Image (cartoon, grey):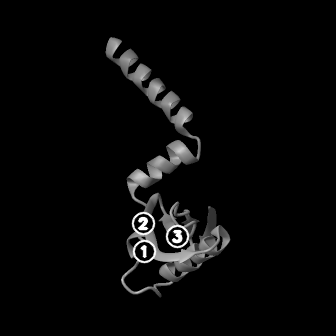
Amino acid sequence: MSTVRYRGFDILSRPYELAETGEWTVDLIIRRNERFRTFSVNERYATVEEADAQCVGLGRRIVDNRVKGWSVDSLRQGNSLWGTLTRLLVHESLGPLIVVLAAILGIGRAILRLS
């Protein structure tokens, strides 16, 4: 499994081995702005390396709109408010700071009510 950054998208290859044949399949995720789409094909490959390379190649072609019927246009839109908050809280480790600020504001409101 590998991740490749391409034109603002993350392409995560997830080839897996079929137990009955030992062949490998192409399965991938394309991600951007906290949103993602999954793709897979029925083609089979002899090695995990070959399947991984096919995942990345397919992902790049999808991002470039070169695969008929498959698109990531819905992922191209700007950040949603939820995506921005999620990134701040989880990915940028600002969660503890925001919790502390919320607690301070709550205490401040309680003090004002008492006065």
Name the foreground residue: 55 vs 115: 55
Q: Is residue 35 left or right of residue 14?
A: left
Where residue 98 sits: x, y (%)?
50, 35
Give the amino acid type for the residue marked by disc 1 in the picture: Val
Helix, strand or loop status at disc 1: loop
Front position among marks 3 and 1: 3
Which residue does the numbered mark 2 point to in the structure image?
37
Vertical side of 51 occupied by 67: above or below: below
Q: Residue at x 58, y 46 (%)?
A: 92
Q: Which residue is outermost to the right? A: 49
Report which residue position mark 3 lands on: 25
Q: Answer with mark 1 or mark 2, whichever residue precedes in sequence.
A: 2
Residue in front for this viewpoint, 33 or 85? 33
- Residue beneath the point at 49% across and 64% down: 31
Residue 15: x and y in percent read 56, 65
**SS type, badge 3:** strand
The circle drawn on residue 7 is none
Q: Is residue 79 visible in this depiction of the protein?
A: yes
Q: Which residue is mark 1?
A: 72
Dot 2 falls on a residue whose secondary structure is strand
Q: How many marks?
A: 3
Residue 40's image quarter? bottom left
Is residue 7 visible in the rendered image? The answer is no
Q: Quadrant of residue 10?
A: bottom right
